[in-house]
Amino acid sequence: MTTNLTPNETHLSQLKFWLQQAYTDGFSSFIEHWHLIEEAYEEQKLIVLEENNTAIGFAVFDIDHEIATINLAELKPGKRGQGLGKLFIQNTLNYLKSQDALAVKLFCAPAESEGFWRKCGFVDFQLPDDSHIHMFKLLTETLKTITNPNSEKTDFVRLWDCEPNEARQTEPKWIWELDYIENSKTLIKPIVIPVFTKWQLELHRESNIISRSMNRFPIRKWIRSRFLVIKEIPV
């Protein structure tokens, strides 16, 4: 088995053939998204799993500001249940990490695929008023949250999983104590977490405090593709 990062037109034809057959046999409806697969091929965002020079699986991905998305992923029906899919996804994640992605997200379609993604290390993240099963996986080691802030520390990030009017009445769900690389404001480890744009975010920086909902927070580069990503603190 080979994970091919640069598939050719022959691989594309092979994928189309068995996707059409899978649709006819009632195994998959991914052929309905064929235009997305073709676009991914043209944009070099298609990864293929090969067996004996034949494409038996694929993944369509995108990377936006260090957050990757797996838009489609499928294994040929006759090749399932052999551990090939999990190995292929791990190779895909390794590639996304090599392209500086910090996390990868997706939503399960069909919903029955949730169990597979869990086996690949993905966990849930449910968005308000959204019935899709959203999942994500971190691709890097991140700063750990704390429960009891160190009274000698001056720099913190606090995040509530609710809107500002509700945040006033409750404690933050996540608190990070900021540790920097020596002589800089770059964090030793980044903060990377999926968020909802109306949640309340608070930055404590020495004697200064910035407290806003995510969609109004002044440091806009922290908000990336439904994730909060903090790698450094502005001076």
Image (cartoon, helix red, strand yellow):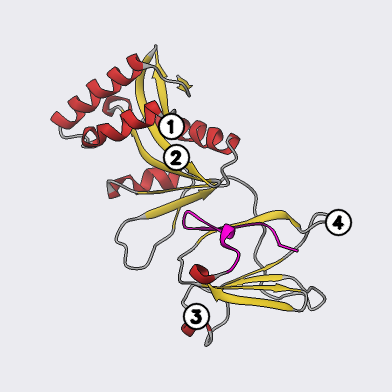
Q: Alpha carbon of mark 1 to alpha carbon of mark 4: how far?
A: 39 Å
Q: Amino acid at mark 3?
A: Pro
Q: Alpha carbon of mark 3 to alpha carbon of mark 4: how far?
A: 34 Å
Residue designated by label 2: 62
Q: Quadrant of residue 44?
A: top left
- Magenta-drawn segment: 218-235
Q: Which mark is residue 161?
A: none
Horizontal placement of 50 versus 230: left or right? left
181 in the magenta segment? no
In the rendered structure, are the residues bearing label 1 and label 2 in contact, judged by CB atoms less than 8 Å apart? yes
Q: Which one is earlier in the sequence, the residue at label 1 or at label 3?
A: 1
Q: Alpha carbon of mark 1 to alpha carbon of mark 3: how far?
A: 38 Å
The residue located at (30%, 27%) in the rendering is 76
Residue 161 higher or lower than 233, as above or below: below
* Quadrant of the image containing the N terminus: top left
Q: Which one is earlier in the sequence, the residue at label 3 or at label 2?
A: 2
In the rendered structure, are the residues bearing label 1 and label 4 in contact, judged by CB atoms less than 8 Å apart? no
Residue 21 higher or lower than 193, as above or below: above
Horizontal placement of 57 versus 193: left or right? left
Q: Which one is earlier in the sequence, the residue at label 1 or at label 4?
A: 1
Residue designated by label 3: 164
Q: Residues within 10 Å of mark 3 (few under 14, many from 20)?
A: some
Residue designated by label 1: 45
Residue 108 visible in the snapshot: yes
In the rendered structure, are the residues bearing label 3 and label 2 in contact, judged by CB atoms less than 8 Å apart? no
Q: Amino acid at mark 4?
A: Asn
The residue located at (27%, 29%) in the rendering is 77
Horizontal placement of 168 versus 83: left or right? right
Q: Which one is earlier in the sequence, the residue at label 3 or at label 4?
A: 3
Q: Which one is earlier in the sequence, the residue at label 2 or at label 4?
A: 2
SS for callout 4: loop
